[in-house]
Image: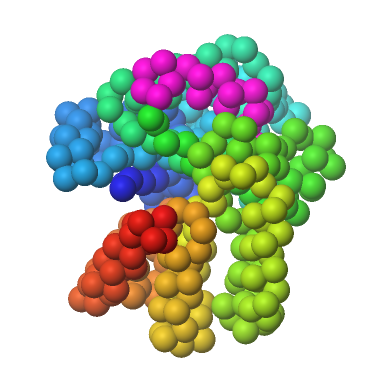
Amino acid sequence: DLLWLVPIHPIGRLGRKGTLGCPYSIMDYRGINPEYGDDSSFRSLLEKAHSIGLGVMLDMVFNHAARDSIYAKNHPEWFHLDSRGAPTTTIEDWSDIACFRFPNEELRELLIDTLIHWTRLGVDGFRCDVASLVPLEYWISARKAVAEVNPDVVWLAESVYQSWVTDRRHEGFATASDGELHQVFDATYDYDIWGVWRAAVTGQGPISRYIEALRIQRGSLPAQAVKMRCVENHDQQRIMTLAPSKSQALAWTAFQAFNRGAFMIHAGQESAATHLPSLFDADKINWGTYELTDVLKALTKLKKHPVLS
């Protein structure tokens, strides 16, 4: 139903990782990376997607921006600062970005205006990067404002591992749990039990433990909560590499497709890809033979069947 694009914006150069830099190190939330096209080509993509019944979901990164972004240049006071007074990160491994310092009313207005801008262009949904790290009240205000333009926009939160929630809180950073995020978001990531699932897939833990984790997850979240299920994504190992055999990889793919929640197909799954492309260099997907297209079509059709919905 939705075509989710990782960030389409210009990428920062300061501290750039790899040759291309990380798409999550953003220079300008309203710009388009010229390697992808321009405003006109983006509108063409929207029109084509809508003509075949697909919505388009943009990846919005509001916890941080590139260290040389227009925001870091014009408003360094919006960020956490290092000992020299330069915008910096609060997450050591993310050395190519600077983290926003919340709360900040000017920043809140910028982020909301950005979402309204893309909604007016015709975007149908937002996948919000590390949504747990952005104040919940920002998201509440943002959803209310966007709904005035289009109340049907779909909101997906990249919620984080539970260990990260507790660790960040211990460090003094406000961090929202999955349950809190469901006050705003239609769906959240499955990372709260991802480790248990991964152990089951690799044979390092019993499947019964994963089944019990699903029960606990369902019982601890609001009744209307939706989980986004997948077997791989741009941050996680390919299922064809993770599972001990191809048949087990297909079985787990079917399990997650039929699991309660939304189901995400990662680019390359259609070809049973084993290589996870780099985020930082030119590393295009080898689409191969599209050998699993019929399987994924069948799973999608069954997933939408009234008996299972």
The quadrant where residue 48 appears: top left
For the point 46% across and 87% down, the residue is 245
Q: Is residue 90 visible?
A: no
For the point 65% across and 29% down, the residue is 136
252 left or right of 220 in image: left
Taking depth in this image into account, of 259 and 99 the one nearest to the observer is: 259
Taking depth in this image into account, of 45 and 87 the one nearest to the observer is: 45
**How many marks do you count on the picture?**
0
- Residue 258 lies, with reference to residue 281, above or below; the image says below
Q: Position of residue 47 (x, y in %)?
A: 17, 35
Name the main secondary structure of what is drawn in magenta.
helix
- Residue 205 lies, with reference to residue 111, above or below; the image says below
- Residue 283 lies, with reference to residue 172, above or below; the image says below
Q: Is residue 283 magenta?
A: no
Q: Position of residue 236 (x, y in %)?
A: 51, 63
Taking depth in this image into account, of 107 and 72 the one nearest to the observer is: 107
For the point 67% across and 62% down, the residue is 215
Q: Position of residue 187 (x, y in %)?
A: 52, 44
27 left or right of 273 in image: right
Quadrant where the C terminus is found in the figure: bottom left
Extreme residue in the front direction: 307
Q: Position of residue 111 (x, y in %)?
A: 50, 22
71 left or right of 136 in image: left
Colour treatment of the image: rainbow
Q: Is residue 168 visible?
A: yes
Extreme residue in the right direction: 170
For the point 58% across and 24% down, the residue is 140
Q: Which residues are magenta?
A: 132-151
